Every structure is written in structure tokens, then in C-alpha cells.
Image (spheres, rainbow, N blue to C red):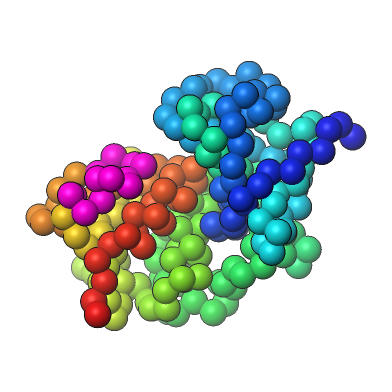
Amino acid sequence: MGLMITATHAAGVGPGLWTFQMPPHQVRLFGAAPTSIGHRSVIVVKACNFDAKAQTLQFDVDDAVALNVGTQPEAIAIAAETSTSRGQAASTSRNATPVSTYAPGDRQFLSLVKDLLPLPMQRAAAALLDGVRQRAQGELKRGLARNFSETPDNFWYVIIQPRVAQLSITIRGPVEHFESMAKLPIKDDRGNTLFKVTSEADVPSALELIFHAKRRK
């Protein structure tokens, strides 16, 4: 066992996915990352212990590998493996919404994702929907193709794009409403705002955008 790391300001944002605070020089403790782009660092952890109440994420330095070193003290941890066991589920997020409680439209979305997207994007889609449902009750409703709209308040809309293995998401509100806080590329979509989720690492930023969308009062 090596040095035990305790990351602070940690939050579970989906199955096997956490955000936390860690300066770039500490991320380099986990080895030479293949990339150094953007402001967020990304690491993969083999095993960890998440404490939602204390907002900490603990893991052994030998169990972590750096994938990207960002420029700011913001980081994302991705579990190397996910498990449906009770102990692992508790460490992922004590407030996670079990899949069994999803409405039929949500389950249809996850089923289509499983059929059309590769495993990494299946995890990203599941983490995204889980993050939404932890904060907003509702149900996705399928359109005529691979598109789903949120009901009863359609403040976000998602299209599954199998050819490029990503999710295209439109959120209510003009680009100007999101420019100051967006951490993913955004563009206009007929008066609303569109962005893409291309990996599980995009999920925390995607959730921030979704919950900055304009809502019906």
C-alpha cells in the first residue's frame, strides 16, 4: 500500500464518477498523463472510498492513473470498474437513484443507448441521466427517431448519435445565458443552446449546463 490520498470538495455525479479539488502538481503524482489540455484534470482510480457527508474521496496513490493534467485545481475521477454490489454502489453515491425507479421513458433511453453506443458512452449516458434524476423528477419521452425530450418541462433534449458515438444535447436558453459558465463547447440551436457529450469525463460539465437551463415557473 502506498500513500493514501484524500481529495476534498468531492461530489458524486454518477455511477463511478466524482468531481473534486486537486491542483495540477498533485495530479502528476499519479504518473505522466498522456494529455495536458483544458482546465480540468482527469484520473482513473482502481479503488476508492467516497464520503458524501464529509465531501471527500480517498484512494491509494498506487491505485490512480492520470489521464489528463488540467490548468486549474478541478479534477474528475473515473472508477476503473463499476459494480452492482451494495458496498460499491454506496461508495459511488449514497444519494444515487436506482435504475429500477426510472420511469418507462428513461428506461427506453438507456435501452436504446445500450443498443447503439459503445460501452464507455453507455456509462456516460447512464451517469448523465442519473445525475439529472437526482435533482429533477421527470421522464424522457422518445420522439420519432433517436431523440428524447424531458417531460413535463422540456428544459433539456437529447439525441443519440451512434455514427459518432456521442450524445447531442439541447438546453433551453440562448448561448449568451451559458457563455460565462460553460466548460464544454456550445453553439446556437434555433434560439436555444447545443453541446455534445463525447465521454464520461464530460458528464459533470454537462450537468452544470443542463441545470443552468431556463425552467418553467
Image quarter hosting the C terminus: bottom left
Q: Nearer the viewer, residue 216 or 72?
A: 72
Image quarter hosting the N terminus: top right
75 sits left or right of 89 in the view: left
Q: Nearer the viewer, residue 156 or 161?
A: 156
Q: Position of residue 199 (x, y in %)?
A: 45, 43
Q: Which residues are magenta?
A: 175-186
Can residue 159 be seen here? The reply is no
Q: Nearer the viewer, residue 61 or 181?
A: 181
Q: Position of residue 61 (x, y in %)?
A: 77, 33
Q: Nearer the viewer, residue 169 or 134?
A: 134
User: Please, is residue 103 above or below residue 133 in the view?
Assistant: below
Residue drawn at x 54%, y 35% is 73
Residue drawn at x 59%, y 55% is 11
Q: Position of residue 118 (x, y in %)?
A: 47, 46
Residue drawn at x 57%, y 77% is 100
| 179 magenta-colored | yes
| 97 magenta-colored | no
Can residue 91 be seen here? The reply is yes
123 sits left or right of 48 in the view: left
